[in-house]
Image (spheres, rainbow, N blue to C red):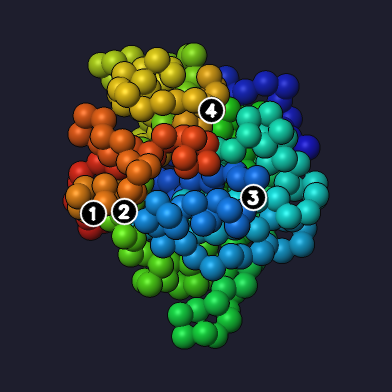
């Protein structure tokens, strides 16, 4: 199920657009698909992240998760618990690529309206889909995190990474202050790095889908802002990635697909201490190679710890 009326990616030039998307803003969270949900969560705890209690999504989703909350974004460790139609693409990803960044969510102001916006552009959205998961709050009470999402058609996946938009109906049960403090001093996502042999082509594809102008970088990578004060997308080859983080082994990364998350640290000394033996210094960054972070290179860099308003 792709939900697309097209046989291939959209080919509309940015200049042909007259109205920007009104119901979709920047990156909300990055989804890391994992094979064993509980083992992945423990691995990230060992890397100094505060990991939320395990969540189980609505039955039709067939998935469970752990979240790693920042401000204003977060990471999600996602696992398949039962086979359903809605998680078929996620299962296919695990079969083909193994663990790693499988999709990126934008924040949706209104998922139903956002879905209609992309429908008006000739793309058939998947959704909107409503679901929820129980949440145990710090005081011991149980509430629910409720969402409404829609996805761009599966074929519209620049760099092999699917995109969707997530409307948070209950932000207070997701952004819980106690879960937003991490021993490794992680504060927020700065960049999502996506490997591809054709950075300019893939960046242009995303730019067309979200009404953002790509920008070529000096090393040949291409950046696409996601909107607002949120993290950027960066498309680059594996060789370019290796030059950005010399000495960090990239074994396990695909030639085309989600490769890395650059995280802002409020204290790099605390980051290095919390990461322990997994830490690798590379230029101004402290990195965790993908083999030690469930298929995702983590690069911690210095930066302001508070959100940019």
Q: Earlier in the sequence, mark 4 or mark 1?
A: 4
Query: Real-space Cα distance between discs 2 and 3?
Result: 23 Å
Residue located beneath label 1 in the image: 270
Q: Horizontal and vertical percent for residue 292?
A: 47, 40
Q: On the rendered image, what quadrant is the N terminus found in?
A: top right
User: Which numbered dot is residue 274?
Assistant: 2
Q: Splitting the image into 4 quarters, where does residue 143 fall?
A: bottom right
Query: Real-space Cα distance between discs 4 and 3?
Result: 17 Å
Count residues near mark 3 (Cα–Cα under 10 Å), then give few for <14, some for 14-19, many for 20+: some
Q: Using the image as rendered, state which of residue 282 and residue 306 is in the foreground.
A: 282
Is residue 250 positioned above or below 116 on the image? above
Q: Horizontal and vertical percent for residue 81?
A: 73, 55
Secondary structure beneath dot 1 equals: helix
Whether the residues at callouts 4 and 2 have beta carbons within 8 Å, the answer is no
Q: On the rendered image, what quadrant is the C terminus found in?
A: bottom left
User: Which numbered dot is residue 252?
Assistant: 4
Whether the residues at callouts 2 and 3 have beta carbons within 8 Å, the answer is no
């Amino acid at each position: 199920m792709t939900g697309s009326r097209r046989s291939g990616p959209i080919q509309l030039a940015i200049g042909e657009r007259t109205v920007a998307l009104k119901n979709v803003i920047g990156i909300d969270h990055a989804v890391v698909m994992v094979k064993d949900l509980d083992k992945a969560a423990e691995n990230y705890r060992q890397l100094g992240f505060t990991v939320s209690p395990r969540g189980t999504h609505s039955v039709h989703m067939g998935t469970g998760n752990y979240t790693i909350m920042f401000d204003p974004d977060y990471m999600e460790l996602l696992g398949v618990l039962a086979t359903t139609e809605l998680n078929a693409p996620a299962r296919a990803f695990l079969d083909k690529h193994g663990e790693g960044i499988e999709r990126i969510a934008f924040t949706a102001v209104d998922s139903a309206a956002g879905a209609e916006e992309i429908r008006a552009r000739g793309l058939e959205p998947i959704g909107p889909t409503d679901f929820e998961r129980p949440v145990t709050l710090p005081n011991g009470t149980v509430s629910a995190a409720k969402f409404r999402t829609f996805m761009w058609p599966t074929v519209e996946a620049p760099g092999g990474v699917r995109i969707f938009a997530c409307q948070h109906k209950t932000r207070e049960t997701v952004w819980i202050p106690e879960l937003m403090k991490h021993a490794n001093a992680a504060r927020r996502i700065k960049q999502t790095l996506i490997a591809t042999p054709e950075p300019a082509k893939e960046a242009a594809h995303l730019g067309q889908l979200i009404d953002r102008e790509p920008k070529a970088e000096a090393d040949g990578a291409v950046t696409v802002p996601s909107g607002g004060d949120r993290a950027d997308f960066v498309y680059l080859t594996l060789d370019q990635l290796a030059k950005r983080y010399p000495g960090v082994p990239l074994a396990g990364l695909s030639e085309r697909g989600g490769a890395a998350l650059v995280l802002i640290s409020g204290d790099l000394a605390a980051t290095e201490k919390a990461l322990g033996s997994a830490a690798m210094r590379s230029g101004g960054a402290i990195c965790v190679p993908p083999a030690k972070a469930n298929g995702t290179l983590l690069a911690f860099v210095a930066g302001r710890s508070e959100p940019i308003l």
